[in-house]
Image (cartoon, grey):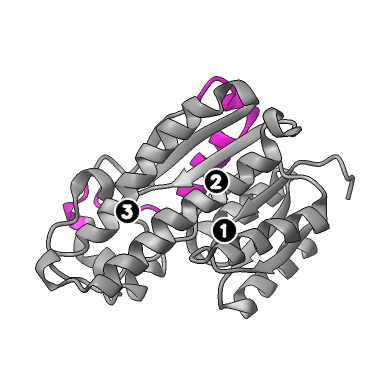
Amino acid sequence: MSADRKTLLVTGGSRGIGAAICRQASEAGYRVAVNYVSNQSAADALVAELKGAGGDAFAVKGDVGHEAGVIAIFEAVDQAFGRLDAFVNNAGIVDAKARVDEMSVARLERMMRINVVGSFLCAREAVKRMSTRHGGQGGAIVNISSAAARLGSPGEYVDYAASKGAIDTMTVGLAREVALEGIRVNAISPGITDTEIHASGGQPDRVARMQDLLPMKRAGTADEVAGAVLYLLSDAASYITGAILTVSGGR
């Protein structure tokens, strides 16, 4: 593959929305770094799929919940591709359904460490590589937020909703901070999307339970969210920064 092709890093890229973003980005011509934290088989399978279709990709292990892990991820991209043109802040967690008065300090600290601090650290490293202030050539960042940020997720996971509210604020602030440095920063705010994240939060039936309450009477797909991400990364969105695009079927 040509060394001048744009490169993309997707954290949490081995499954769900992250994997859909990697597939669509590879089809669009990006060289793709697929980050994962534990499921190496899923990451390796995705990389093999992308390469089999003529793409250029590699898997990189790293935990965004720790600064050393974040730095290692970005250094691996430096070594593999020599540049970074686009970054998707996708890695994140949800916990078991609980009220606020049932949440432990350990749960809250883990939620904020991974979803908020990890996203900030990743954005920091991306800016260091893409900003013209640091000798970069510019680029685009898309943060994955959630409709939960405005809905609050009462009785389920207010902590997760709050962490995504922080992502929305970071998106607006960072976009304005680096607007003159060649970097656009936007966010996608998905609604109910049919991915494994619901099962990881102990609610594998959540999509089925919620879909009749949605205006379109169905959940979104990972591909529908990924399509919006690719739009915001593309030159078609060249005058869009600081935006939070809701992809929720009207919810």
Report the span colored magenta.
212-241
Instruction: Say left or right for 109 vs 38.
Output: left
Q: Nearer the viewer, residue 23 or 172?
A: 172
Seen at 25% across and 74% down, the residue is 96
* Disc on the earlier residue, 2 or 3: 2
Estimate the spatial distance between the alpha carbons at disc 3 and disc 1, rounded to whole Å.
17 Å
* Picture quadrant of residue 3: top right
Instruction: Say left or right for 56 vs 194.
Output: right
Q: Secondary structure at mark 3?
A: helix
* Disc on the earlier residue, 1 or 2: 1
| Marking on residue 11 | 1
Estimate the spatial distance between the alpha carbons at disc 2 and disc 3, rounded to whole Å.
15 Å
Seen at 78% across and 62% down, the residue is 51
As displayed, is residue 234 above or below residue 211?
above
Image quadrant occupied by the C terminus: top left
* Disc on the earlier residue, 3 or 1: 1
Q: Tell me the residue that label 3 is attached to.
A: 163
Q: Tell me the residue that label 2 is attached to.
A: 123
* Picture quadrant of residue 200: bottom left
As displayed, is residue 108 above or below residue 239?
below
Which amino acid is tagged 2? Ala
Instruction: Say left or right for 242 vs 12.
Output: left
